[in-house]
Image (spheres, helix red, strand yellow):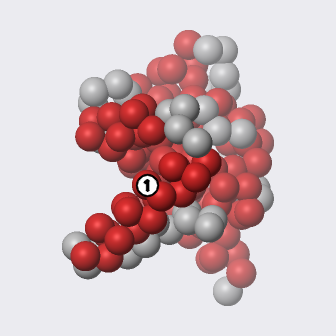
Amino acid sequence: MPGHTAKRDLAAKVDHLFRTVRPRGGGEYSFEEVAEAIRTKGGPTISATYLWQLRKGKRDNPTKRHLEALAGFFGVPPAYFFDDAEAERIDAELALLDALRDSPVRQIALRASGLSAKSLETIAEMVDRVRELEGLPTAPDDTR
């Protein structure tokens, strides 16, 4: 049933944004925080309940203005909700930002900054080997 897939996809995308984009040093944004921020920025009227319904898939036909406001709040382009290829690309960027929240990962990235391409490739190979030794999958966004 095509309509059902779109409904699930929208809810999954909204849910993913709530789970991934977080305030500095905190848990998820509350529905009320998001609704209030959208109202404060002059966006369309949107309620915390409506945001919950979108996230849970209870509502699946928001206006373009609501999606634009939601995208603006979470710092993603509105295309995130309409273009699956764009959503995948943005999700990969969000995953990287999420990983960089982890202090040790961030420290490794900062220390590697400025190294030659050959050195970075060697480090990447070392990380892949250690992941293998620890039974972890290779990084999902690996483009090598």
SS of the residue under disc 1: helix
Residue 134, quarter of the rendered image: bottom left
Q: Does residue 33 appear in this view?
A: yes
Identity of the residue drawn at 49% across and 28% down: 35
Residue at the bottom extreme?
1
Identity of the residue drawn at 69% across and 75% down: 3
Residue with the mark numbered 1: 123
Quadrant in which the N terminus appears: bottom right
Image x and y of residue 25, in percent? 28, 27
Closer to the camera in the image, 142 or 5: 142
Identity of the residue drawn at 66% across and 22% down: 43
Q: Does residue 101 appear in this view?
A: no
Identity of the residue drawn at 48% across and 58% down: 122
Closer to the camera in the image, 69 or 21: 21
Answer with left or right where residue 69 lies relative to residue 133.
right
Image x and y of residue 82, in percent? 76, 56
Residue 101, quarter of the rendered image: top left
Q: Amino acid at mark 1?
A: Ile
Say few, some or many: other residues with alpha carbon within 10 Å of mark 1 (under 14 / 14 to 19 / 20 or more).
Answer: few
Answer with left or right where residue 82 lies relative to residue 116.
right
Image x and y of residue 107, in percent? 33, 34
Image x and y of residue 67, in percent? 68, 42
Residue 137, quarter of the rendered image: bottom left
Above or below, 14 against 106 in this view is below
Residue at the left extreme?
134
